[in-house]
Image (tube, rainbow, N blue to C red):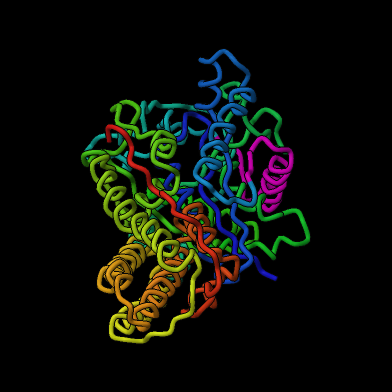
Amino acid sequence: MKKLYITTAIDYANGKPHIGHAYEKILSDAIARMFRMQGRDVQFMTGLDEHGQKVSQSAERAGVPEQTHCDGIAQDFKDLCEKLNISYDRYIRTTEQEHKRVVRECLQKLHDAGDIYKADYTGLYSKTAERFVLEKDKVDGKWPSDYGEVVEISETNYFFRLAKYQQWLLEYVESHRDFVFPEFRAKQVLEFLREPINDLCISRPKSRLSWGIELPFDSNYVTYVWFDALVNYITGAHYTHDDFHDYWPANYHVIGKDILVPAHSIYWPIILHALGIEPPKTLLTHGWWLVSGEKMSKSFGNVVNPLEFAEKFGADAFRYYLMREMTVGQDCNFSPDRFAVRYGSDLANNLGNLVSRLLNMAHRYCDGTVRKVTIHESPEMNLQKLWQPAIPEIISLCNEFAFHAALEKLFQCVSAINTYMEERAPWKLAKSNDASDAQRIDTTIAIAAEFVRIAAVLLMPTMPSIAERILSALGYGGELNWTTAVEFGDSLAGNVVSDGMILFPKIDGE
């Protein structure tokens, strides 16, 4: 049975994790969890890109072998995934023997087909991007800042016949509107393809760089790091195994906008096509996190350390902020002040306060037990009328990757539960000797608890730990599938709930 295969871009072993790495993994994780909750068999892969000139230079500066340097970086990124509760199924490293075999097999196949040739070349080379560049790549007459130093190089190398397949890819992108998400980003790809493109240099001489995968047909050269890195996606899909087509084509490559063109939208689909393999179905392309409108950069000193926020405020609060603030595909400003507002207003005062009050009132007025709903009056009907259409709308927004809008809608519904409890005011009803008011208290606790349960189920992809804590506090151990677990009912009737809970504690000095 075909798995739903989701990948992140593999991180480059040249620095510490930052908010861009964290967001891409959180977004991918939310998508993976969302599809799992809809009954899909998901394979979610992330990993580390360990070869190339910058990695070699970083290891040299640190005075350690390249593999030792990469082992340390790999641990940093695995720690990030663990602390952010990233539920990946496979962590791939490009220094693994299996990956090396796959890369060499692909290179040999392309070489045997005549799609790789040897030639002399003189051109401009970006040391930072680790690739040859053209004058047309300049912006307003200047090299982009992420190109770093650009120098002229003359050397003999191996080239892949990229231009041979240009027309095929142009027609493919034009006819497959879902190949690039959001759709407006496909315009960049088409603009690139409507201009002549050069063949791709896929080697580096060992005399200049030895840290890489040796070419199978010439031991004097190693593989270009981008060719090596892109192949990780089929390595993770069991390319050399019988079950490859259970994984491939990938459903979603989740990547940043800076590596859409040319790497993922030009090089990768053409390499796959030349190998006789289908392209991935969708390149899900997200924007950048900015600070005061500027891209985060070590040189600017404005890089946000995701672990600091996760450790101080909790991983789920950090996950919520990133997913709530950014519209997938667009850039977004990171603001500690905005984070504080989300933490205090949405999480502590709205969701956290609701859960705490609900549990406390259940113990105060109902001996800690959720009873059955026995009253159906206007407050109950109004709350159900709000929630009933909202649930499929929230799921639909998530399926469209509009997580920011889905979370906005969900927290409006959470606010409505708070409003309902204020309207019913069990603390006032408890002073009455009327039997109907006792039923109203039971009903208030039961209905509020059931909608809190549904909210937790819907929050699971974004805030898995918090959602699990809420469900555990309610004594719910049932289905989590979005088809059945979001239906309103009496699934909590008879449950004994926890006696109070603080989900989002106040942070001293914040």
Residues drawn in magenta:
91-119
Q: Quadrant of residue 435?
A: bottom left
Front residue of this view, candidates 137 and 290:
290
Task: Classify the position of the C terminus by image quarter.
Answer: top left
Image coords of residue 250 (percent x, y): 58, 61
Question: Residue 67 sits in which quadrant?
Answer: top right
Residue 417 position in % (x across, y down): 33, 69
- Is residue 10 covered in magenta? no
Q: Residue at x 51, y 56 (%)?
A: 253
> Looking at the image, how many numbered discs can be counted on the residues?
0
Based on the picture, tell me whether residue 106 belongs to the magenta stretch: yes
Question: Which quadrant, please, contains the N terminus?
Answer: bottom right
User: Which residue is most to the top?
Assistant: 63
Q: Position of residue 257 (x, y in %)?
A: 38, 50
In the rendered view, would you say 339 is above or below 35?
A: above
Q: Nearer the viewer, residue 397 or 494?
A: 494
The residue under the point 25% across, 48% down is 341
Q: Is residue 458 above or below residue 329?
A: below
Query: Visible in this render: residue 191?
Result: no
In the image: residue 287, left or right of residue 166: left
Furthest-right residue in this view? 242
Q: Nearer the viewer, residue 324 or 387?
A: 387
| Residue at screen point 44% across, 74% down | 446
